[in-house]
Image (cartoon, coloured by chain):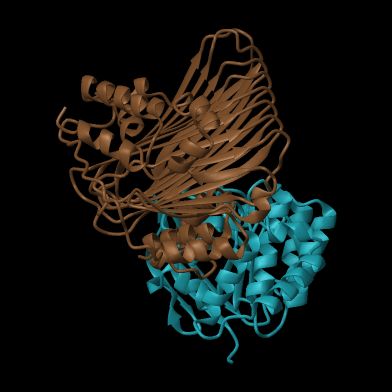
């Protein structure tokens, strides 16, 4: 119980209502009670769970990559939220978006000002009970956003949430709550930037939960450069209602030690999910990434497309999981995982998982591969005068480009492309 | 610029330790079209791949120079930048790389840093050449060869050739998989390039192609070497009479590589 004061301190600092404080405390108990998890492809036994104390103030000016991304978003008229090391620096919802009745606020403020929405949905899609790190995030989240789009409202311009981690935060616990009411539509781009100083021994546990009501259309892109140092956990999940559609993009360029889950629970009849993920790993990256579609409703559709590129001594695992529950009749799904190894010491697993508990399945396909860049492709490009290193760069870019292009904010796309280019310089 | 000059002397090429090309001599100069004919399995495509520098093909003897430079010491990309082009029988598919981006990168690699082709000019030229080859404009932004039909791939090879303007162009069975209309279009493109600035080596099974691309020289390959050379009349003879009379004349029983008689 030595860290329990962190919960009390956070609650007090943000003037949280009693229910929220109780939720944090309950989650803290769960975190403490749960044993360190044993994962098939990730050894957590040597990782420590260090965090706190959490800073109360941070420099207000966004510089560097964060500054450039925020600037570009502002110019594009996007609502932006900027959090540095868990401290909310600013949220600009923009008047145009506010006029639609949309809420875009930091989650601390929202828990007071839009208590009904937050209380109804927080923790319903990602629950503290499901994993030690989900419990930890539920207990200690700070620096997060709420996006709430009312019934029938279509927000054309994407929301941008930038979380900057500098190492001063002593652990990163962002939480994002997206509530898309019936027949609404929205796009959220969330960027987790690590700018030096990532601390070994610390924990990063991030959660994105999306509640997409009937016929809602939600797109969420999570882009990051998860760097080495902390043990990183990511849980991004959507609950997808009747005839609703959720589209995920996950893109990471880094050398971090990460266990990630991106999941759509297709609960409503006719709900759909598209999930595109890419990782470019270097150094001693360990990315244990699961992309998952759980088919619960009838006539549900899912697509999973994972692309990994590994350099150096990166050792990663890309797992596609399609689960068709009993009663989820006429489900359609396809998944593919493809990994390219650029260096001799890079290692990877591509694991397709199909769990089918229903006899009436419309279609269910999968494909997985791990391999070097195809020498026939390299030869072909070289035969037109393109030097080998450039040929490899083009082929890898070709592999990753469809995911990069799916990121719906130009400034973020540019940043991501820059990170990829930097990694691929021979 | 001087006229292109490819010189092959006593070339030997092995694949997986087995010698496929066995002492081949050939000279191709700018302005000339050479056709290499011959039945399957006589080493024609091996010759093409070895000249381009495909890593599976090991040159075990002989010399090849392009404009006096030792081609065999160059990497694949250096050969291309020196002006060699191979229109491949089975070009690779590269997902995610657009045709236009690929061709522009190749062109700029050839032109060298500081001499890149202006983007607008490139696209204008590309679309002009695509029109001449009856290639749908959408192919510029499509991924390189991905989902192209056999004929579309062949036309795309020729598109690259006309864009890159090589000094020596090798066409490896460019006619296979082409219907007669496509064959005419491809032949027209080759003929339009014909000039003292380019020499062609056209590899084919069939004389049909050589009705449209009329060669100056015709060579027949058997058992990994050129066994007979002549002009276009030789190709007509082969079309009319097949290869057996030639085999008889030469005392060859089995024309494929590895056979001794």
Q: Is residue B219 visible?
A: no
Q: Which residue is drawn at 32% across and 51% down?
A: A85
Identify the residue shown where x is 49% and y is 68%. Answer: A386
Residue B132 in view (yes/no): yes
Q: Residue furthest bottom?
A: B1
Instruction: Answer left or right for A334 relative to B121.
Output: left
Foreground of the two, B98 or A258: A258
Q: Residue furthest right?
A: B181
Residue A304, horizontal then vertical, whole percent = 54, 33
- Reply above or below: A146 against A410: above
Image location of residue A68, percent across then percent down: 47, 66
Specify the chain shown as cyan.
B
- Taking depth in this image into account, of A318 and B199 the one nearest to the observer is A318
- On the rendered structure, is B241 left or right of A399? right
Instruction: Report x, y in % for residue A137.
Output: 34, 33
Q: Give the residue at x 30% y 26%.
A: A25
Observer-nearest residue: B118 or A62? Answer: A62
- The image position of residue A275, as x and y in percent, is 54, 36
């Amino acid at each position: 119980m030595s860290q329990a004061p962190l919960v009390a301190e956070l609650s007090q600092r943000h003037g949280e209502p009693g229910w929220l404080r109780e939720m944090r405390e309950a989650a803290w108990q769960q975190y403490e009670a749960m044993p360190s998890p044993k994962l098939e492809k990730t050894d957590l036994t040597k990782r420590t769970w260090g965090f706190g104390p959490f800073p109360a103030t941070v420099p207000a000016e966004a510089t560097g990559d964060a500054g450039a991304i925020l600037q570009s978003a502002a110019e594009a008229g996007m609502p932006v939220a900027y959090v540095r090391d868990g401290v909310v620096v600013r949220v600009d919802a923009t008047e145009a978006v506010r006029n639609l009745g949309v809420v875009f606020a930091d989650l601390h403020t929202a828990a007071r000002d839009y208590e009904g929405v937050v209380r109804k949905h927080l923790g319903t899609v990602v629950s503290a009970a499901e994993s030690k790190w989900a419990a930890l995030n539920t207990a200690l989240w700070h620096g997060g956003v709420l996006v709430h789009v009312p019934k029938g409202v279509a927000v054309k311009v994407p929301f941008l949430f930038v979380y900057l981690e500098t190492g001063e935060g002593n652990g990163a616990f962002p939480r994002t709550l997206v509530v898309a009411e019936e027949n609404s539509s929205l796009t959220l781009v969330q960027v987790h930037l690590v700018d030096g100083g990532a601390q070994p021994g610390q924990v990063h546990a991030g959660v994105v939960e999306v509640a997409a009501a009937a016929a809602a259309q939600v797109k969420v892109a999570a882009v990051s450069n998860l760097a080495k140092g902390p043990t990183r956990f990511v849980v991004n999940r959507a609950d997808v209602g009747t005839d609703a559609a959720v589209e995920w993009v996950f893109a990471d360029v880094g050398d971090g030690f990460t266990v990630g889950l991106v999941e759509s629970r297709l609960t409503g009849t006719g709900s759909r999910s598209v999930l595109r993920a890419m990782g470019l790993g270097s150094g001693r990256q360990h990315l244990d990434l699961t992309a998952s579609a759980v088919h619960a409703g009838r006539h549900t559709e899912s697509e999973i497309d994972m692309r990994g590129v590994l350099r150096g001594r990166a050792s990663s695992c890309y797992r596609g999981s399609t689960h068709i529950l009993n009663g989820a009749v006429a489900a359609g799904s396809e998944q593919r995982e493809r990994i390219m190894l650029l260096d001799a010491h890079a290692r990877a697993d591509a694991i397709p998982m199909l769990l089918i508990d229903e006899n009436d399945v419309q279609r269910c396909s999968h494909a997985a591969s791990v391999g070097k860049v195809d020498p026939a492709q390299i030869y072909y490009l070289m035969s037109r005068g393109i030097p080998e290193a450039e040929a490899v760069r083009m082929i890898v870019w070709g592999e990753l480009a469809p995911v990069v292009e799916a990121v719906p904010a130009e400034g973020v796309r540019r940043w991501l492309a820059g990170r990829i280019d930097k990694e691929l310089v021979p | 610029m001087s006229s292109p000059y490819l010189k092959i002397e006593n070339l030997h090429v092995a694949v997986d330790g087995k010698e496929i090309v066995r002492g081949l001599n050939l000279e191709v100069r700018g302005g000339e079209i050479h056709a290499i004919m011959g039945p399957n399995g006589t080493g024609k495509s091996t010759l093409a791949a070895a000249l381009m520098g495909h890593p599976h093909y090991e040159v075990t003897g002989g010399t090849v120079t392009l404009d006096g430079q030792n081609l065999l010491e160059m990497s694949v990309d250096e050969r291309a930048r020196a002006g060699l082009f191979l229109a491949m029988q089975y070009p690779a598919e590269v997902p995610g790389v657009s045709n236009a981006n690929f061709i522009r990168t190749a062109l700029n690699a050839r032109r060298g840093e500081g001499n890149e082709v202006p983007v607008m000019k490139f696209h204008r030229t590309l679309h002009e050449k695509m029109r001449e080859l009856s290639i749908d404009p959408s192919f510029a932004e499509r991924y390189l060869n991905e989902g192209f039909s056999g004929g579309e791939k062949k036309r795309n090879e020729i598109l690259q050739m006309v864009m890159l303007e090589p000094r020596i162009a090798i066409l490896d069975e460019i006619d296979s998989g082409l219907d007669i209309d496509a064959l005419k279009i491809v032949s027209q493109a080759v003929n339009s390039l014909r000039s003292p600035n380019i020499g062609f080596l056209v590899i084919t099974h069939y004389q049909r192609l050589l009705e449209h691309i009329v060669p100056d020289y015709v060579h027949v390959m058997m058992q990994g070497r050129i066994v007979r050379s002549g002009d276009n009349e030789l190709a007509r003879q082969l079309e009319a009479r097949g290869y057996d009379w030639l085999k008889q004349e030469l005392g060859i029983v089995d024309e494929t590589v590895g056979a001794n008689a």
